[in-house]
Image (cartoon, rainbow, N blue to C red):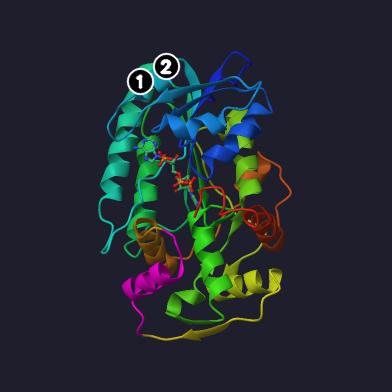
Amino acid sequence: MVPPALTSSDSVLIIGATGFVGKRLIPELAKKNIRLRLLVRDLAKASPLILPGADIEVVQGDLVANEGTAEALRGIHTAYYLVHSMGGKTLFKNEEYAEKDRKAAKNFMAAAEAAGLKRVIYLGGLGETGDNLSEHLRSRAEIAQILSSGAPKATVLRAAVIIGAGGASYEMLRYLVERLPVMITPKWVETRIQPIAIKDVLEYLVGCLLNPDTAGKNYDIGGPEIFTYVEMMQKYAETRGLAKRFIIRVPVLTPMLSAYWVDLVTPIPSGIAHPLIEGLRNEVICHDNRIDEYVHIAKTPFKDAVLTAYSEEKDGPGITGF
Ligand SMILES: NC(=O)c1ccc[n+]([C@@H]2O[C@H](COP(=O)([O-])OP(=O)(O)OC[C@H]3O[C@@H](n4cnc5c(N)ncnc54)[C@H](OP(=O)(O)O)[C@@H]3O)[C@@H](O)[C@H]2O)c1
């Protein structure tokens, strides 16, 4: 059954409002006069997100600790779920995040059912299911399953690398290509990827909210081009007017060695970088474009997405401060 359409008296909750995607979604929804509530862990991070004239409430909470969850969900029509638990510095493999993410999603679902939530919109990761899937992508898929298992109708959007200032995967790409004219890489550089501009992701997120027919469905979302990682790195260099990068493939570089290399060259916290690097072996491309029947957008070319991201970075360290 299609859930009721959002009306002007309904409220929408954003969980992950202080993150790369969440903080950019706030003004897009506020422009449409949508009443918003934000669940945030740290109130200090929320104050810059409160736009003058917009109807925005803030609730302090933490999904893993299950604090503030019920309060945040009270009277909410649709919740955006833009949360993951990767982060921090770790010398070795980050093994805790999948368990935390599972706990967070289960706590959310229990509170959402009790509150009578109608819809949840989750942004997860592309990548085929199977034994070879990285722990990170497997965890993202597991969260999609948990969020799709209850009474609220879930819309799952699955994306590969999002191109935008402050996005962890994009920043890894940017630092590697900007800093290294010569790169020694393992064979994952031949894996295919379909990056997407943050602008397009936001349009899909808003479009799904406004079209109740997207409830209860999973969609792949991607930009207009498919690259291998090596092609994407070269395209980044070309877009930025940098010399062509020398990329030397070696068979012996393990994901862990690549991860330590990324730690040396980029400021991305290892707790985020390592799980992302492990996922580079998995092809992340869209297998269908059913979303286009419901949400009509002009897909942003990779080059334009990079130029926009770079223009935002130029004046500072990127929106989330890498
Ligand atoms: N970035 C990409 O390239 C990309 C690509 C594909 C899919 N995605 C998906 O998009 C979604 C959002 O990613 P993002 O890049 O915006 O991540 P992000 O910048 O790291 O933001 C994560 C958000 O989750 C919040 N959070 C973490 N643990 C929480 C908890 N226990 N309780 C409440 N909030 C918690 C964080 O709050 P704090 O500010 O307090 O830490 C932050 O607001 C994720 O599902 C991710 O898998 C991202």
What is the distance, in whole Å, between disc 2 and disc 1 at their CAs? 6 Å
**Residue found at x 51% / y 48%:** 320
Residue 230 horizontal/vertical position (percent):
55, 76
Image quadrant assignment for residue 238: bottom right
Q: Is residue 297 left or right of residue 209?
A: right
Count the numbered circles shown. Answer: 2
Q: Quadrant of ligand 1?
A: top left
Viewer-proximal residue among 302 and 52: 52
On the question of residue 309 being in view, the answer is: yes
Q: What secondary structure do most residues of the magenta stretch adopt?
A: helix
Residue position marked by numbered label 2 in the rendering: 74
Assess whether residue 266 is covered by the magenta stretch: yes
Boundaries of the magenta span: 252-268
Extreme right residue here? 298
Residue 50 horizontal/vertical position (percent):
57, 27
Q: Against 250, is 79 above or below? A: above
Viewer-proximal residue among 163 and 210: 163
Q: Residues within 10 Å of mark 2 (few under 14, many from 20)?
A: some
Residue position marked by numbered label 1 in the rendering: 70
Residue 97 horizontal/vertical position (percent):
30, 49
Marks 2/1 in contact by CB < 8 Å: the verdict is yes
Q: Secondary structure at mark 2?
A: loop
